[in-house]
Image (tube, rainbow, N blue to C red):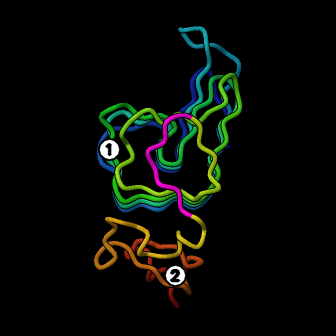
Amino acid sequence: AVNGYPDVFIGGLCGSGRGIISECQILGDIEMYASVAANQYGNSNGYAGGLVGKNGKVEISNCNVFGDVNSMGGYSYSGPLAGESNSSSKGNNNYYKGVINAKGNLDYGRQKSNIFGINYISEDSIIWGEDFSSKLTDAEMKNSEKFKGFDFKKIWISDPNVNSGYPMLRCFYNNFVL
């Protein structure tokens, strides 16, 4: 958990960013609290994302996040990959398994960009605002055929005995197999 004021940016990988994020995996919950102290515009903003809190111009590809994303206080923005993204952000072949929560002056997870290309989230994720992801049931998330566009020959692997049956990046696979 991270507390801050007047503006807070928190993500599983970084608070805010520009550039390329590729082949990463985040395991664990993200929790952010924005205080009631105001910024220069008279409000307090909190951005919480599975990977990035506030996304400048980032391309996210072949990443997965397992865990809940919670933002509380002030104007709270939460999202599976980013709490907020600008219109030049892009994403492909990512997936999220968890629940999104935003509690504050605004109660929604804000995804205002085309960060979502071919991306999937669990059907029990709660998303408010714009969402460009495809929702899958828990059983579907364990079926590699449901992940259209994902490269299961070179980048991803699906093994029912590892990672609870969910797809994982090949670069982490050997760390899970004895």
Measured from the top left, where is residue 133 in percent x and y?
46, 50
Identify whether 136 is placed above or below 171: above
Give neighbour class at mark 1: few <14, some 14-19, many 20+ (Cα, 10 Å). some
In the figure, residue 17 lies in which quadrant? top left
**Who comes first in sequence, dot 2 or dot 1?**
1
Identify whether 58 is placed above or below 43: below
Residue lying at 49% horizontally and 76% vertically, measured from the top left: 143
Q: Which residue is mark 1?
A: 90
Q: Which mark is residue 81?
A: none
Circle 2: residue type: Phe
In the figure, residue 107 lies in which quadrant? top right
Give neighbour class at mark 2: few <14, some 14-19, many 20+ (Cα, 10 Å). few
Is 132 within the magenta? yes
Q: CA distance from mark 2 to mark 1?
A: 30 Å
176 and 162: which is toward the camera: 162
* Residue range highlighted in magenta: 129-136
